[in-house]
Image (spheres, grey):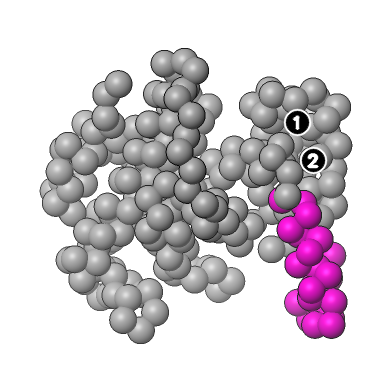
Amino acid sequence: MRTAASPTTANPLLAGADLAAMARLLADGTRATFCLALLDGRAWTPTELAKHAGVAPSTATEHLNAMVAGGLLAEERQGRHRYVRLADQQVAELIETLAAAAPVRSAPPPRTLSADSRRRALAHARTCYDHLAGRVGVAIADAMTERALVDWEHGLRLTPGGERWLADLAIEVPAAAKRPALRPCLDWTERRPHLAGAVGAALCGHALDKGWIRRVGSTRAVLVTPAGREVFQGALGLSAELLTPVAN
C-alpha cells in the first residue's frame, strides 16, 4: 500500500495515527463506493465514478483528491483527462477484506429489475482487482484444494501438481518478487476465501484472454462463457449449474 513514508522510514510510534488516517479515508459511503467500483482493476475517470456513486462531479473530485493524497488511489493523466485506480494489490485486498468483514444486513428489495440482475451477477462471478471472486471464484479455490493443486497446510502454496495443471492449460505465472504466488482473499459475498496473488491474477487474465469469461458491461461482474464452462468442468469438475448465473 502506498503511503507517504516508505517501509524503511516509517515510524512505529506513528502507526496508530497512520491507521486512523486510513480509516478516516474509508469512513465515508461515497469513498467506499468508489473503492468497490475500482476493484475491477481498471482506471476510472472522476466523471464515471461520480455517476456510479450518484454524486456531483465536484464532490467526486474532492473525495478523489483526498484518497490520492492518502495513498488509497493512484492517478494517471493523459492530456486533459484524469484517471484513478486503486494504488496497488494490497489496497484491493484490504477493501475486499473489509467488505467481507462488514456486518451482514438484510438488503432492501431492489427498486428495479436491472438492479437485482446486477446484484445477482456480482455475487455469481466478478473480478476482485485482477483475480476471480464471487461464487465461481470460491468454487475454483475449493476445487483446486480438493484436487491437491494448492495446499493450505503450511501457508497457501501451489503444489507440483498445480504447476503441471497450470502448464497444461498454458497459464503462465510471471515471476514477481514483490508479490506472493498465492494469497487467500476473503470473498465479500461468499465470506470464504478465493485465490489472489500472482497465480490468481494469471488464471483470471488467461480466462479473459481466451474468452472463458467476459465482462458484463462496465461492472465488475463476469460471465462464464460456453467455452469457459467446458474448461472449468473438464479441468476442475465444476458443475454447469454452478457456472451458470441464476435467472431472475
Q: Amino acid at mark 1?
A: Pro
Direction from residue 113 to residue 178 in the image, left or right: right
Residue found at x 36% / y 75%:
157
Quick one: 208 or 106, which is closer to the camera? 106
Q: Residue at x 54, y 68 (%)?
A: 179
Does 153 lie within the magenta span? Answer: no
Picture coordinates of residue 221 (x, y %)? 43, 34
Q: Secondary structure at mark 1?
A: helix
Q: Would you say the residues marked 2 and 1 are in contact, meaning their CB atoms lie under 8 Å apart?
A: yes
Amino acid tagged 2: Leu
> Which region of the structure is painted magenta?
4-26
User: Does dot 2 land on a helix, a strand or a loop?
Assistant: helix
Residue topped by disc 1: 46
Quarter of the image that includes the C terminus: top left
Q: In percent of the image, x 71 and y 37: which residue is there?
A: 30
For residue 2, side relative to residue 175 (left or right)? right
Magenta-colored segment: predominant secondary structure: helix
Tell me the residue that label 2 is attached to: 64
Front residue (pair 158, 192): 192
Which percent across, then down, holds residue 167? 27, 61
In the image, is residue 158 above or below residue 44?
below
Residue 10 in picture, x, y percent from top left: 82, 78
- Foreground: 109 or 59? 109
Q: Height in image: 182 above or below 226?
A: below
